């Protein structure tokens, strides 16, 4: 039985297989409509979510399966003190596969150690978000045609943004990927990513503060919101929350084929005037998230269609 905790749990070849399957699902949805008849997905969300939880649920429903779960710790017996380990033992009796989001880093890993069913990390604290990474990879591959030979700018809260940490880990495995990290000093990419992921792989990268200075050299711009829920004090959040606002003026400095991605939710960091720019693909990214999660459920349940 396999779980998905980190984007590195799949080899580059396995990622390609999942993305190929997701692309086939996109083209031939009817072929997969009963692939998970009789199967149940549990969504255990101890932290708020719109996209990840609902796209998992949509994915399982589109495969013919059913879903159950909870959307907050407060509405589960976690509020009475039940541990993650005990909870997953129960859920293993109710479902065939589970997606778990938790504010504590490593909580899905703890669950996977005692689980009787595959566990998918749907985001753990500021650590990892591997299914968002698969979504991002599918978006890039589908719309750019490749995952290698790209310059990607990651902009915003690079310290707490788990989607950024996961995406960097995944992309260092492809040839000639250049990273440009764009953040205020306080929200720089963590030193463990610089040392253990970038330096350890001999990866070329640079860190800058001003988006305007580098936007013209990017093939992809990955915008992120400042992660309010991970700040220790409100004052720091208020000071940093509008540090970057991508607007039409800045888009005019970008290449005509630069794509703008965002894991969403957006707060103020992308002006709504950018939404109609054909280079803004963050809502298409959401649709790819459903196909990729369908492919992941089939892969982990070992269902062949
Ligand atoms: N991208 C993402 O994880 O969104 P949600 O927090 O709404 O699930």
Image (cartoon, grey):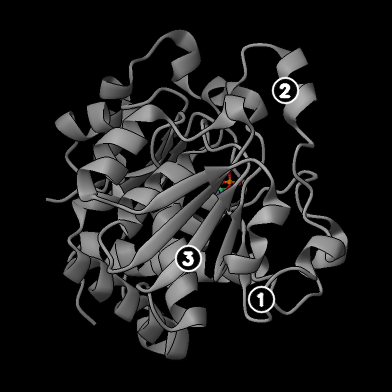
Q: Which mark is residue 130?
A: none
Judged from the image, the secondary structure of the residue bearing numbered disc 2 is helix
Q: Is residue 238 left or right of residue 79?
A: right
Judged from the image, the secondary structure of the residue bearing numbered disc 1 is loop
* Quadrant that contains the C terminus: bottom left
Q: Name the quadrant containing residue 131.
A: bottom left
Q: Earlier in the sequence, mark 2 or mark 3?
A: 3
Q: Position of residue 188 (x, y in %)?
A: 53, 32
Residue hosting label 1: 255
Q: Position of residue 154 (x, y in %)?
A: 55, 51
Judged from the image, the secondary structure of the residue bearing numbered disc 3 is strand
Nearest the camera: 89 or 23?
A: 23
For discs 1 and 2, the disc positioned in front in the rendered view: 1
Nearest the camera: 72 or 196?
A: 196
Residue hosting label 3: 151
Residue found at the far left of this picture: 1
């Amino acid at each position: 039985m396999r779980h998905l905790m980190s984007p590195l749990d799949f080899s580059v070849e396995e990622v390609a297989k999942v993305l190929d399957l997701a692309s086939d699902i996109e083209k031939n949805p009817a072929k997969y409509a009963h692939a998970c008849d009789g199967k149940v997905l549990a969504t255990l969300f101890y932290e708020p979510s719109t996209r990840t939880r609902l796209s998992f649920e949509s994915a399982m429903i589109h495969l013919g399966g059913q879903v159950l779960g909870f959307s907050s710790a407060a509405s589960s017996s976690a509020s009475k003190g039940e541990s993650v380990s005990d909870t997953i033992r129960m859920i293993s009796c109710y479902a065939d596969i589970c997606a778990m989001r938790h504010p504590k880093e490593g909580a899905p890993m703890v669950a996977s150690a005692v689980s009787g069913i595959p566990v998918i990390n749907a985001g753990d604290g500021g650590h990892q978000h591997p299914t968002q990474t698969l979504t991002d990879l599918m978006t890039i591959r589908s719309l750019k045609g490749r995952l290698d030979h790209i310059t990607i700018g990651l902009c915003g809260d690079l310290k707490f943004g788990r989607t950024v940490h996961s995406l960097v880990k995944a992309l260092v495995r492809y040839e000639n990927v250049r990273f440009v990290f764009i953040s205020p000093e306080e929200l720089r990419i963590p030193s463990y990513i610089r040392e253990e992921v970038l330096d350890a792989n001999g990866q070329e990268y640079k860190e800058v503060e001003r988006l305007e200075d580098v936007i013209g050299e990017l093939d992809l711009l990955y915008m992120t919101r400042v992660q309010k829920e991970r700040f220790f004090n409100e004052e720091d959040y208020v000071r940093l929350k509008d540090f970057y606002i991508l607007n039409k003026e800045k888009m005019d400095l970008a290449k005509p084929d630069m794509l703008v991605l965002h894991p969403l939710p957006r707060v103020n960091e992308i002006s709504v005037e950018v939404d109609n720019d054909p280079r803004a693909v963050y809502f298409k990214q959401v649709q790819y998230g459903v196909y990729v999660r369908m492919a992941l459920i089939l892969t982990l349940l070992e269902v062949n269609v």
